[in-house]
Image: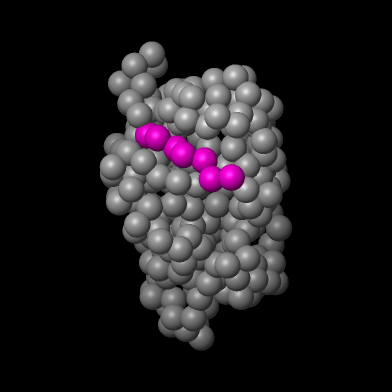
Amino acid sequence: MIASKLFITLGASLSVNAFSLYEPGTDKDVTKACDKAMAADIDCDREVISFLNGGWYGSLDSEALTDAVCTKACSRSLQDYVANVSEDCDEDKARGGLRIWTGWNATCLKDTKTGRYCNDIIADFTDVGEDEELPHDELCHPCYVKRLEMYKPSPYALNIKWHEEQLELVHKKCSSSTTTESAAPTSSKGESSGAETTAEASEASQTANSEEESVSSTGTPVQTMSSEPTVSSASNAAANFGQGELFGSRALMLLLSMNLFFM
């Protein structure tokens, strides 16, 4: 696969936070339609650029920042971007947009009973040891179950065994009625962002995380959980091992700060 240059540039045509992942004319091997699609502005808070790292998408540690990320405008913009790039370009060109889209949905998943973001709920889970289980109400919490079901580790992730064991445990000990009913992505103002149903989310997430990305213009991929042997807490252990999915994650963030990276 030919490497593609992705430039993070400010966008002026949309909101103050809009940005572009690609500088027009950079890739001479793509069609004009593809070049235009890849260079389109994404109308989201620039925090979503961090989602390009993949792996575990944890709490942003700020409800105000999460609200700024989880807007209907951002949801629609990301869906349009991925759909257009997938239609006008080779399949691999949509990978960056799909990764951001996956991270957006993991970040914006909410518990409909409390209105809290699922990441914040999971971050408050009980610390457990290597051979210990989470308390039943946490293990079977809709947010935790939904994220486990939607997350598909890459073949190189360090958390594959842990993920399989957690899924098996959840399916064994939790009733099916708790798995999907009260976890769903929403916009920051409680508005559904169009096609954000949990069933579609699971299907699209599997596509995005398998590294065989094909666009689902109405799906809502959600990526999650990474952890393995010593689980200091569900979210902290997940974060530690999720970093193993992308080699050189820290290097990637350094490059992003220079507004340049290579896919």
Looking at the picture, tell me which residue is in the foreground, 38 or 112: 38
The residue lying at 44 percent from left, 76 percent from top is: 231
Query: In the image as oriented, which residue stretches furthest toward the top?
Result: 13
- The answer to whether residue 193 is visible is no
Q: Residue furthest bottom?
A: 131
Residue 50, x across and y down, in percent: 38, 45
Above or below, 34 relative to 167: above
- x and y percentages locating residue 228 in the rendered image: 50, 76
User: How is the protein colored in the picture?
Assistant: one colour
Q: Is residue 86 left or right of residue 16?
A: right
Residue 44 shows in the view: yes
The answer to whether residue 183 is above or below residue 13 is below
The residue located at (51%, 86%) in the rendering is 131
Occupied quadrant, residue 148: bottom right
238 sits to left or right of 208: left
Picture coordinates of residue 86, whole percent (x, y): 65, 32
Q: Residue at x 30, y 21 (%)?
A: 16
Per the image, is 5 magenta?
Answer: yes
Residue 261 image-quadrant placement: top left
Q: Position of residue 30 (x, y in %)?
A: 61, 29
Q: Residue at x 38, y 75 (%)?
A: 232
What is the count of numbered marks?
A: 0
What's the magenta region?
A: 2-8
Q: Nearer the viewer, residue 148 or 160?
A: 160
